[in-house]
Image (cartoon, rainbow, N blue to C red):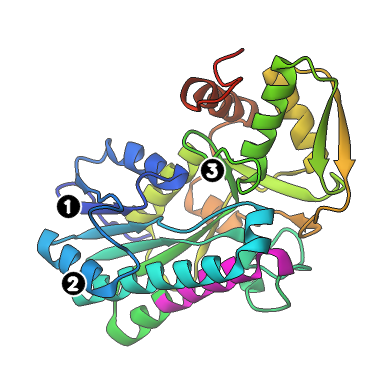
Amino acid sequence: MTSFYLAGKRVWVAGHRGMAGSAIARRLARENCEMVTATRSELDLLRQAHVDAWMADRKIDVVFLAAATVGGIMANATRPAEFLYDNLTIESNIIHAAWQTGVKKLLFLGSSCIFPRLAEQPMREEALLTGALEPTNESYAIAKIAGIKLCQAFRRQYGCDFVSVMPTNLYGPGDRYDAEGGHVVAALIMKIHAAKAAASPTVELWGTGKPRREFLYSEDLADACVFVMKNYSEEMFLNVGTGVDMTILELAQRIAAIIGWTGTFTFETSKPDGMPRKVMDVSRLRNMGWVAPTSFETGMKEAYDWYVANVPGPYAMTT
């Protein structure tokens, strides 16, 4: 393995207010580096000239590229132009500027949705581009595939030390709590918490509840990103996950147990299921010496406690 040191370097976490980016920022506090961030009002990531000038002015050494337009299955399905344009533009602007300004190393965060809809499970890194994508998140997936390929292209042509990781489905502090546009874990926390507060006997799940998904605590992703930044320098991206999956119904039941709600789940089968199964082969990263340390129950309890303490709403402070 390579040895790349973060200590003493100027490190930009692009997307530091999102769930993944904020977790990376917290993790970097242990690395004795100088962390640099920018809000949307300070830096428009959709404008190449702004990104070029900002990075050149701040003399950035290292970039964690976690900035993205994100959302759950419904947001992906109904806002494809936004998901494709925003993510293509953000990643190309930052990666190009990183090359231009002499950034020493960049880590790009992709998504497990890059894999074919019917990929062999668990999904190995080599499965990329071996089949058709899941239609409900095709735009987001194409943008993330482009980001991987852009990192590889700059590595091949210019010798840039740009690497990529593909996280599985995330949950944790700072998630987007939006019933229509959020990810599945956040949506379920909201629904089940509200059902408990209102003494409702049922909660509706979108789809059949049968698709299988893998879930990773955001703080574990951050630790993996720092590990990869310090120890990996190759063209192939690395899957980041637990290698363990569950059905959406099982997910809902386990969240209900943490929240303390004992009702019944119903199914809105007119809503899309998405990919039938999505679980990562994480053997490459495991063989390097990194394994996700947080149990599902521990991580989900942290995520729920953060929601109760931080998200305003009619039931947000009720436990």
* Residue that carries the numbered disc 1 in the rendered image: 9
Magenta stretch, main secondary structure, is helix
Residue type, numbered disc 1: Lys
Residue range highlighted in magenta: 134-150
Q: Who's the residue at 68% across and 55% down the image?
A: 74
Q: Quadrant of the C terminus?
A: top right
Check residue 141 for magenta coloring.
yes
Check residue 1 for magenta coloring.
no
Secondary element under disc 3, as helix, strand or loop, is loop
Q: Are marks 2 and 1 in contact (CB under 8 Å)?
A: no
**Cα–Cα gap, marks 3 and 1:** 26 Å
Q: Does residue 14 appear anywhere in the picture?
A: yes
* Residue that carries the numbered disc 3 in the rendered image: 291
- Sooner in the amino-acid sequence: mark 3 or mark 2: 2
- Sooner in the amino-acid sequence: mark 2 or mark 1: 1
* Residue that carries the numbered disc 2 in the rendered image: 102
Residue type, numbered disc 2: Gly
Crowding near pointer 2: few (<14 within 10 Å), some, many (20+)?
some
Of all residues shown, which one is farthest toward the bottom? 157
